[in-house]
């Protein structure tokens, strides 16, 4: 009996119908970049210092400049530092101080300020001209700096729970319906986040925002790879992620003109409501419908595809099916991901690679906020290096296969991070350049893991397999902010060492996976177990 892949070859593997659908799906991928890495712009941390009661009045009285005020009223920071403390102030009541404008401190011992210190009990003053961010609005600095890490961790927690839920839903109820529901929830919650009054509610709705957003992105990815012919799967899979990179490159421009976090949140949420019109614009996956014995509905989509592509469907395709999926019809199970030896091995290796790629990828992006340079330019470059990664994949993936480029990406990122960690600070530009090479390598791995993951599972659990494995990606995302911001307090190179070791391990494990070059998408568990044959 003819298969769906045979029908695709007949009506056009990537005709006008698929190209229009692919373009519409790519728009959603570009918008997802804001939610995935936009944290860098939401969480801008400007220069800040403790608010001291009475200092403002004293400054006006003495006509001090800002630098004079800081010099007179702030203690020095850490030992060996020439900057002012951001988390401590003198324990002085400036309203009752007996000092003069030239020497406002009440006493000085041995030419140094030997005064009692206290924490910033009255809040902080943020640098003039700084735009509102979640850091300034919710005062997520000093002892509360970990709460900033927690916001990104909760988003990734939502990603993890949501992708498993949406993966199961997409295999049970269809790719299109699951995509639309997830998009609607993400849009509404994103709108609510714009008007959140305090940190606690921001944390709650940030988690809810993650709950459906990544699941929606993965549903769209699986859907588009199922809609095109074998020879085009690699192209649409990579270009789908290039659209994400394009959105990442555009994001700093949007953030530059809309620097206040609430405005940025609103501007990047409203377009998502337009994706709800896809109810009328895109079909359900015919491959999924065939796996659910919905042959009439699948044939209707295939006929529309043929008509739009200027092709005709011969009579031998009046009855087509996805081979031997009936044993599991409508009942994808988590147990199926570990039941048989080959699928079990695929699941464990892919899980670790999802974890590693997300940890290193997000970590290198978050690290941009700690470099002290132009955050908009650095972010743009970080997105731009992803384009050569995609071109490289497209050039080699059909020549040497999937496995070697996948492994090389992890090994390159790991080696680059380890080298960058030990470069002296006086040539920090070299460390930054090598870290960007690491970003290119981990981008190759990230784009390949999504692509290869979809090729290593049979149709009836494909979306579930991608979603469950990618849940480990979100554990990496949960860990990333704590590694970047907390371990750097020990030594600035510590995060890069962690990223380097994990990158090398992930690249080595990929070599244990089978090569999928030139193979049709497996439809049954038996297809996967015999994939090396």
Image (tube, helix red, strand yellow):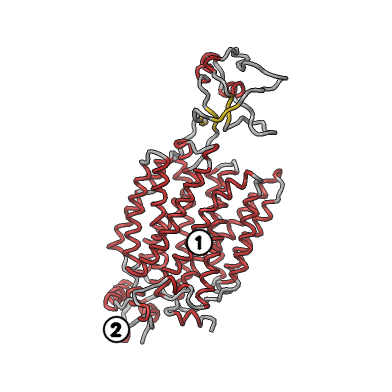
Return the x and y of residue 30 as percentages of the image width and height: 43, 55
Q: Position of residue 447 (x, y in %)?
A: 51, 63
In this rendering, would 328 be left or right of 70?
left
Residue at x 60% of width, y 27% of height: 117
Nearest the eye: 90 or 351: 90
Residue named by callout 2: 318
Q: Label 1: which residue?
A: 472
* Left or right placement of residue 195 versus residue 130 in this view: left
Query: Quick check: can you spot residue 410?
Result: yes
**Foreground: disc 1 or disc 2:** 1
**Marks 1,2: beta carbons within 8 A:** no
Please tell me the numbered disc located at residue 4.
none
Image height of 421 relative to 442, above or below: above
Q: Report the front residue among 104 and 503.
A: 104
- In the displayed structure, 127 sits above or below 296; it is above
Label 1 or label 2, whichever comes before in sequence order: 2
Distance Cα–Cα, label 1 vs label 2: 42 Å
Report x, y in % for residue 139: 48, 36
From the viewer's side, name the closer residue of 344 and 225: 344
Residue at (54% x, 32% y) in the render: 48
Q: Can residue 391 be seen from the camera position used here?
A: no
The secondary structure type at the circle numbered 1 is helix
Place of residue 368 in the rendered image (x, y in percent of width and height, measured from the top left): 57, 47
Locate the N terminus and report the quarter of the image it occupies.
bottom left
For disc 1, the neighbor class at 10 Å (few under 14, some 14 to 19, many from 20) is many
Which quadrant holds residue 511?
Answer: bottom right
Snapshot quadrant of residue 213 = bottom left
């Amino acid at each position: 009996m003819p298969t769906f892949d045979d029908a695709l070859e007949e009506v056009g593997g990537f005709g006008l119908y698929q190209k229009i659908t692919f373009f519409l799906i790519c728009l959603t991928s570009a918008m997802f970049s804001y939610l995935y890495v936009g944290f860098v712009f939401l969480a801008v941390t400007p220069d800040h210092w403790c608010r001291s009661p009475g200092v403002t009045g004293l400054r006006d009285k003495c006509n001090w400049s800002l630098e004079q005020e800081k010099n007179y009223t702030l203690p020095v920071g850490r030992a060996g530092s020439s900057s002012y403390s951001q988390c401590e102030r003198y324990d002085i009541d400036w309203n009752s101080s007996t000092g003069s404008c030239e020497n406002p401190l009440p006493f000085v011992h041995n030419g140094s300020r030997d005064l009692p210190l206290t924490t910033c009990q009255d809040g902080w003053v943020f640098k003039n001209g700084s735009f509102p961010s979640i850091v300034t609005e919710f005062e997520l600095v000093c002892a509360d700096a970990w709460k900033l890490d927690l916001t990104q961790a909760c988003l990734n927690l939502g990603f993890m729970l949501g992708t498993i839920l949406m993966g199961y839903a997409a295999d049970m109820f269809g790719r299109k319906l699951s995509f639309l529901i997830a998009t609607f929830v993400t849009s509404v919650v994103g709108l609510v986040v714009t008007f959140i009054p305090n940190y606690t509610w921001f944390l709650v709705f940030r988690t809810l925002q993650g709950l459906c957003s990544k699941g929606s992105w993965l549903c769209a990815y699986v859907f588009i790879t199922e809609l095109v012919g074998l020879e085009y799967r690699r192209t649409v899979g990579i270009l789908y992620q290039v659209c994400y990179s394009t959105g990442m490159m555009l994001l700093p421009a949007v953030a530059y003109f809309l620097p206040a976090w609430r405005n940025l949140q609103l501007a990047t949420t409203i377009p998502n409501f337009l994706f709800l019109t896809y109810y009328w614009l895109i079909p359900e996956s015919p491959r999924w419908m065939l796996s659910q014995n919905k042959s009439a509905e699948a044939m209707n989509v295939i006929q529309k595809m043929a008509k739009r592509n200027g092709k005709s469907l011969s009579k031998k395709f009046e009855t087509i099916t996805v081979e031997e999926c009936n044993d599991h019809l409508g009942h994808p199970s988590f147990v199926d991901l570990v039941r048989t030896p080959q699928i079990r091995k695929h699941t464990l290796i892919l899980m670790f690679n999802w974890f590693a790629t997300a940890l290193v990828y997000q970590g290198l992006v978050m690290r941009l906020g700690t470099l002290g340079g132009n955050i908009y330019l650095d972010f743009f470059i970080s997105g731009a290096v992803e384009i050569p990664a995609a071109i490289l994949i497209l050039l080699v993936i059909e020549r040497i296969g999937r496995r070697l480029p996948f492994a090389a990406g992890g090994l390159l990122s790991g080696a680059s991070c380890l080298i960058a960690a030990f470069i002296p600070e006086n040539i920090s530009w070299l460390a930054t350049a090598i870290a960007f090479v690491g970003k290119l390598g981990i981008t190759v791995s990230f784009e390949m893991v999504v692509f290869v993951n979809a090729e290593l599972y049979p149709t009836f659990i494909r979306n579930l397999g991608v979603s469950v494995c990618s849940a480990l990606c979100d554990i990496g995302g949960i860990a990333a902010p704590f590694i970047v911001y907390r371990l750097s307090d020990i030594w600035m190179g510590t995060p890069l060492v962690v990223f380097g070791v994990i990158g090398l391990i992930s690249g080595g494990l990929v070599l244990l996976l089978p090569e999928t070059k030139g193979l049709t998408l497996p439809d049954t568990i038996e297809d996967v177990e015999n994939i090396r044959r």
